[in-house]
Amino acid sequence: MKSKEVKKSVRDSYAKVAKRGSSCCGDSSKSEDVSKAIGYSQEELLSIPDAANMGLGCGNPTAIASLKEGEVVLDLGSGGGLDCFLSSQKVGQTGKVIGVDMTPDMIDLARDNAEKNNFTNVEFRLGEIENIPVADNFVDIIISNCVINLSPEKQRVFDEAFRVLKPGGRIAISDIVLLKPLPEAIRDNKKLLAACVSGAELKDKYLEMIENAGFEDIQVMQKGNALTQEVEGEKKDGEPEAKLIVDGVELELEDFDADIEDVKNLGKSIQSITVTAIKN
């Protein structure tokens, strides 16, 4: 698919998610369970608006971001605002959180969540992560949760991230990557694009693009696959994002012009990672 077609497909899919308040990969009743399984605590989830948690992530970048009071945080693909609201509590009133999303319905939802719950140090801007609506050298840290895989111009996203960070700034990104190339029929599927699969990049290439943008000290802090979530060498419960994707696909095989075994084995091809890096 061409870049414009990819963006339109993603925007349309997430507009529907915003309107119904649930994940593209799962049912709204599972959002809390998904968020807990990928690293959010019950305390964190209780501290944010219910409507902000739609089960859209594949990790918890705020858990390893080491946010400090007074910092400026930028969330790429902020959705309903979950990570923005968690970040706002850590940076305090002397800090600032900016959420950027290209879907107007998501921006409306996030702004409504902020207003109703008095999050005064958070703002949401409509824009594309390939052309971030933020000034050069402005933010201390960039977070993102299962969004960059959706972009057809990932190198530009990382280049833009480098531009808007202050010297010494850092990134903490959770995302989906590939362990091996996907069959063409799966890569071209629009449903799997919105489900964070068909647009994903090979893991080594993904990390190479971060380095090409100028980042240093690149570290993969967490990783998981469809069967296990591995954190600091310890295997934990099944990684839900990949499992929900695979489960959903298996229920709708008629939607895919692909070999059934290729579809069923998707979980072995994708991995969730959380990456940190620094702009020196």
Image (cartoon, rainbow, N blue to C red):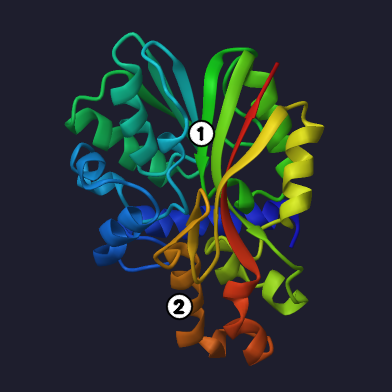
The quadrant where residue 240 appears: bottom left
In the rendered image, the residue lying farthest to the front is 233
- Percent coordinates x, y for residue 27 in the rendering: 32, 68
- Percent coordinates x, y for residue 68 in the rendering: 40, 17
Q: For mark 2, give the secondary structure.
A: helix
Tell me if I can see residue 188 in this picture.
no
Q: Residues within 10 Å of mark 2 (few under 14, many from 20)?
A: some
Hey, what amino acid is under mark 2?
Gly
- Percent coordinates x, y for residue 180 in the rendering: 74, 68
**Label 1 – label 2 distance at C-alpha:** 27 Å
For the point 51% across and 48% down, which residue is it?
Answer: 232
Q: For mark 1, give the secondary structure.
A: strand
Q: Please state, as top left, top right, bottom left or bottom right, where the N terminus lies in the image.
A: bottom right
For the point 30% across and 16% down, which residue is it?
Answer: 92
The quadrant where residue 154 appears: top right
Vertically, is 79 above or below 197? Answer: above
For the point 18% across and 32% down, which residue is it?
Answer: 116
Q: Which residue matches tag 1?
A: 143
The quadrant where residue 225 appears: bottom right
Q: Residues within 10 Å of mark 1 (few under 14, many from 20)?
A: many
State which mark lies toward you, 1 or 2: 1
Vertically, is 55 above or below 72? Answer: below
Q: Which residue matches tag 2?
A: 248
